[in-house]
Image (cartoon, rainbow, N blue to C red):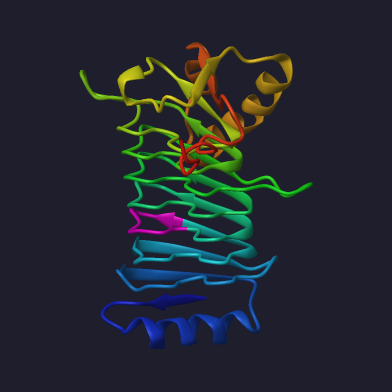
Amino acid sequence: MSIVAGLERYEKLNETIKAELQSKNKIKVNDVNGQRYIGCALDSGKTIEIHGTPGNDLACYLNGGKIIVYGNCQDAVGNTMNGGEIIVHGHSGDAMGYGMRDGQIYIRDNVACRGGIHMKEFENMKPVLVIGQNAGAFLGEYMAGGTIVLLGLGLARGEKLFGTHCASGMHGGKIFVRGRIPKENLSANIKVTELNSQDEKELKQYIKKYCKCFSIDYNEIISKPFKKLVPATSRPYANLYTPN
C-alpha cells in the first residue's frame, strides 16, 4: 500500500495512515513534506516506510513498530519511544531519541544538537542510538541509561566528532566513540575509558546492524579504535544546591 503525502495536513495524513494500518502490517508513504507525528505510538508488527522529509516527533512514543526513512528528519525523532526500531537514510535534527526508554535508532549520517538526552533504561529495557557521522552540542545530556554509538564516518578535515557540552549532567549509560575525541567539548563529569570484552561484544552487534541497514563495510569501521565515555559519578550535581 502506498500513500502520497504531498501537501496534505498532518492530521489528515495520520488519520489515513492509521486507517490503512488497521488491515495492513506495512505501508509506504511517499512525498512527505514535513508532516508531524507520523508513526506516533506505532505498535509491534507494523512498519511505515517513508520517502521524503518527515516533520517533528516522528515515531514519538513508538511502541514496538518499525519506521524506515529514505531522507532526512526534523526534530524529536523517537521522542519517549517505548520500543521498536527507527532507521534513517540521512541525517536528523535536534533532540533525536529524547527520553527514549527502549528500542533502537540507526542514523546513517549526523544528528544535530541534544541527541539522546534523558535516555534511560530499566531492567531489560535498554535503548540504543547509533549515529554514523557526528553529533552537535549536548549529545547525551542528562543521560541516565542506554547506549549511544558515535561512528565518526566521513568527517571533513577539522570537523569534530561531537559539539560542546557533550554528556553534560550524564549520570548513567555509556557512549562509544570512534576517532579523535575533542576533549575541549567533553563535560568535566565524564571519564574516557577503554572497552572491556563485554563492551566489545555489545558494540559489534550494533555496528553489524548499522552496516546491514546502510550497506557499509564492517571491517572499515572496526579498523579504528573506540573509547567509552561514562559518568564519573551518578550524582554530578549533588552539591549544586548545597549551602556553604
Quarter residue 37 falls in? bottom left
Which stretch did the figure color magenta? 69-77
Q: Position of residue 77 (x, y in %)?
A: 44, 58
Q: Would residue 25 be found to the left or right of residue 15 on screen?
A: right
- Residue drawn at (60%, 70%), measured in percent from left and top? 42
Q: Position of residue 118 (x, y in %)?
A: 52, 49
Q: Would residue 241 be found to the left or right of residue 207 on screen?
A: left
Residue 182 visible here: no
Give whichever of 218, 72 is nearer the camera.
Answer: 72
Q: Is residue 70 magenta?
A: yes
- Residue drawn at (31%, 69%), measured in percent from left and top? 31
Indicate whether 40 appears above or below 150. below
Indicate whether 207 appears above or below 141. above
Q: Position of residue 233 (x, y in %)?
A: 59, 28
- Residue drawn at (48%, 27%), measured in percent from left and top? 189
- Residue drawn at (33%, 53%), measured in percent from left and top? 72
Residue 224 visible here: yes
Give whichever of 117, 215 is nearer the camera.
Answer: 117
Quarter residue 56 falls in? bottom left
Q: Position of residue 26 (x, y in %)?
A: 59, 69
Q: Is residue 119 magenta?
A: no
Give whichever of 138, 130 is nearer the camera.
Answer: 138
Please identify the residue farthest to the right as the structure is shown.
123
Quarter residue 141 falls in? top left
- Secondary structure character of the magenta stretch overall: loop
Indicate whether 84 appears above or below 199. below
Q: Would residue 111 be found to the left or right of residue 244 on screen?
A: left
